[in-house]
Image (tube, grey):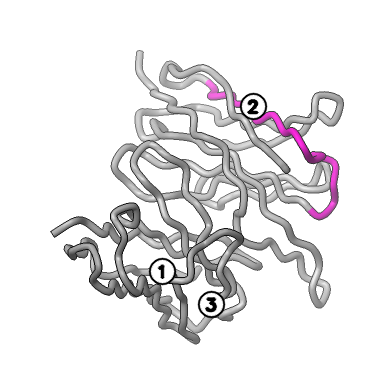
């Protein structure tokens, strides 16, 4: 079973700054099956990125995903106030598993 | 546009069975390309996939919960349901129903990312 490890656990940044979130898989996985979600308090997760780098419908261009093999990155180019939330990576395809999450908080 | 709405009791006693229902509008639970799923999130913790149903009757479950989980669909009501037996306090969580698309690729069943989620249902296990 593949384990997804997200780092850091918490990222403290100011609006306008760049956020870089990491998701590392315990073994090489297909980038076709790596997704990122955003979750705000009291809300369901929202799909941001699928296939490691494709933005879901309606997702702003400041969100981008990259990576392959075991290392994947979610980048938020310039943080907006509404971007402070928890972010999860997820492996899908033939199996389903989530990473532990990274909280992006206001510094 | 597909919309999901979860419902069910907010309080379940230990050792009893947790039962939740997700009502689907704007789509069909009998559609072969949709995977109707349950995901849970204990308070302050991360997401855990529970299982899914597709094609109205085929299912797949998280191995860690498989012995206690059952997911079924009622096509006449266009809804799918979760049953989790022998619950303990560790099953206290927000339970989400969600939809993913998928299909077969190289003879393997493939499920894609969860593009649609319902607002969660908080379930507390307590006597």
Subunit that carries the residue with mark 3: A
The answer to which of A62 and B114 lies nearer the viewer is: A62
Q: Residue at x 77, y 33 (%)?
A: B73
Residue B16 is situated, as x and y percent measured from the top left of the image, at 50, 19
Label 2 and label 1 in one chain? no
Residue B1 vertical position relative to residue A80 in the rendered view, above or below: above
Secondary structure found at label 1 = strand
Residue B2 is situated, as x and y percent measured from the top left of the image, at 71, 41
Q: Which residue is mark 3?
A: A53
The answer to which of B65 and B12 lies nearer the viewer is: B12
Specify the quadrant of the image occupied by residue A104. Answer: bottom left
Label 1 and label 3 in one chain? yes
Residue A61 vertical position relative to residue B23 in the rendered view, above or below: below
Label 2 crowd bin: few (<14), some (14–19), many (20+), radius 10 Å: many
In the rendered image, residue A24 lying in the magenta stretch gets the answer no
Q: Which residue is mark 2?
A: B21
In the rendered image, residue B31 lying in the magenta stretch gets the answer yes
Between discs 1 and 3, the one toward the N terminus? 1
Specify the quadrant of the image occupied by residue B127. Answer: top left
**Gap between marks 2 and 1, in whole Å?**
29 Å
């Amino acid at each position: 079973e593949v384990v997804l490890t997200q780092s850091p656990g918490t990222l403290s940044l100011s609006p306008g700054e760049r956020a870089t979130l990491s998701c590392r898989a315990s073994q090489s996985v297909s980038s076709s099956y790596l997704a990122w979600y955003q979750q705000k308090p009291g809300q369901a997760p929202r799909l941001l990125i699928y296939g490691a780098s494709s933005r879901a419908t309606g997702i702003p261009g400041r969100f981008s995903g990259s990576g392959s093999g075991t290392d994947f990155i979610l980048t938020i180019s310039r943080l907006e106030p509404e971007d402070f939330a928890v972010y999860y990576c997820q492996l899908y395809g033939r199996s389903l598993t989530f990473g532990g999450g990274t909280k992006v908080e206001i510094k | 546009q597909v919309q999901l709405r979860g419902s069910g009791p907010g309080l379940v006693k230990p050792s009893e069975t947790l039962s939740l229902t997700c009502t689907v509008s704007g789509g069909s639970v009998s559609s072969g390309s949709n995977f109707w799923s349950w995901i849970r999130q204990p308070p302050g913790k991360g997401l855990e996939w529970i299982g899914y149903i597709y094609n109205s009757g085929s299912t797949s479950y998280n191995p860690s919960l498989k012995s206690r989980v059952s997911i079924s669909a009622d096509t006449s009501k266009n809804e799918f349901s979760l049953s989790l037996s022998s619950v303990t306090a560790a099953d206290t969580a927000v339970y989400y129903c969600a939809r993913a698309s998928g299909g077969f690729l190289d003879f393997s069943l493939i499920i894609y990312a969860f593009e649609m989620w319902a607002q969660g249902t908080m379930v507390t296990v307590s006597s």
